[in-house]
């Protein structure tokens, strides 16, 4: 780690078999991080060895508790005054890195956090519009002032006090292929269904249809997804379908049966 650039910053990350991409993520912050914390679960591909040997990360192993709770476990290990929460499929851009350095060195007592835009690489291009950008995310916090909250499938950082916007993008490689996107849809729809059942939600066809149509209209027209070419159209269409699919899972649960009835 470069002592000339190192700032009082802990970078925390959770990981499961991320050897194929963790170098890009940790490499983007290794010259400014004073401490790197990695909380792993069931890694078998060398993730821990890469983080420890190449980036001097402190490794902690825990069983899987879900994204939100696992990230809160990682927060507790951080020792420095500021914490940057990073995922293995993310990379800090040069502009964002400069903003983080300036923000921490100024140490304005008015702010306990900094948020910034995430930019997704998908279908061979950066996505600059629609529902996927700017996707502001609060990830830089003063130690002891923040906690991961929200639901299991949509966790979010909550802090005491104010946060401010930092310039620069956090590059996000969340969807390397269309196939991986479908796998995520299935995984998160399971969690969404569990949450609906816990709240004893009733299924309404009009709600499922309207929500899907609205998501397409908002992403493609209101948020200018059409400016991203065909990938922008695909994202808006997929977002609409995934919304309709998640809400229809409740219908399947309530009305389908293992064996057909007599006609």
Image (spheres, grey):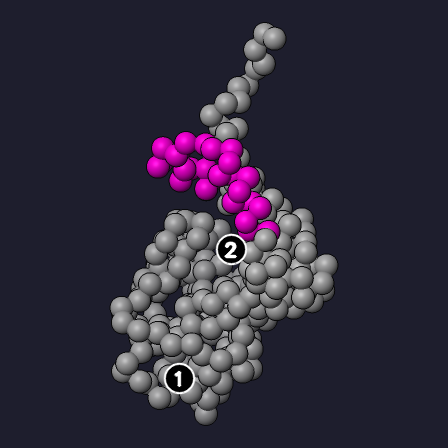
Residue 82, horizontal then vertical, whole percent? 35, 76
Residue 19 vs residue 128, the one in the foreground: 128
**Between marks 1 and 2, how big is the CA–CA gap?**
31 Å
Residue 139, horizontal then vertical, whole percent? 42, 69
Seen at 68% across and 54% down, the residue is 234
Disc 1 or disc 2, which is closer to the eye? 1
Quadrant position of residue 46: bottom right
Please say if 218 is above or below 227.
above
Labels in figure, total: 2
What residue is shown with label 1? 103
Please say if 14 is above or below 180.
below
Seen at 33% across and 63% down, the residue is 158
| Helix, strand or loop for the magenta stretch, by majority | helix
Q: Secondary structure at mark 2?
A: loop
Q: Is residue 215 magenta?
A: yes
Crowdedness near tag 2: few (<14), some (14–19) or many (≥20) residues, C-alpha within 10 Å? some
Q: Which residues are magenta?
A: 190-216
What residue is shown with label 2? 16
């Amino acid at each position: 780690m470069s002592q000339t650039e190192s700032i009082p910053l802990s970078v925390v990350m959770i990981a499961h078999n991320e050897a194929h991409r963790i170098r890009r993520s940790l490499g983007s912050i290794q010259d400014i991080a004073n401490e790197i914390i990695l909380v792993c679960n069931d890694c078998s591909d060398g993730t821990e060895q890469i983080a420890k040997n190449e980036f001097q990360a402190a490794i902690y192993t825990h069983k899987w508790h879900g994204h939100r709770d696992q990230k809160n476990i990682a927060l507790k290990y951080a020792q420095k005054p500021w914490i940057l929460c990073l995922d293995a499929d993310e990379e800090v851009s040069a502009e964002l890195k400069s903003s983080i350095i300036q923000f921490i060195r100024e140490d304005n007592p008015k702010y306990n956090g900094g948020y910034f835009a995430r930019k997704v690489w998908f279908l061979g291009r950066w996505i600059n519009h629609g529902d996927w950008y700017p996707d502001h995310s609060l990830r830089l916090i003063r130690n002891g002032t923040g906690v991961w909250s929200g639901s299991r499938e949509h966790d979010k950082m909550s802090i005491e006090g104010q946060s401010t916007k930092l310039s620069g993008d956090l590059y996000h490689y969340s969807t390397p292929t269309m196939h991986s996107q479908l796998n995520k849809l299935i995984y998160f729809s399971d969690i969404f269904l569990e949450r609906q059942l816990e709240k004893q939600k009733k299924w309404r066809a009009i709600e499922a249809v309207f929500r899907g149509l609205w998501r397409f209209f908002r992403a493609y027209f209101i948020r200018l997804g059409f400016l991203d070419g065909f990938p922008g159209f695909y994202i808006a269409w997929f977002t609409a379908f995934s919304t309709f699919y998640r809400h229809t899972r409740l219908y399947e649960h309530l009305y389908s049966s293992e064996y057909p009835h007599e006609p």
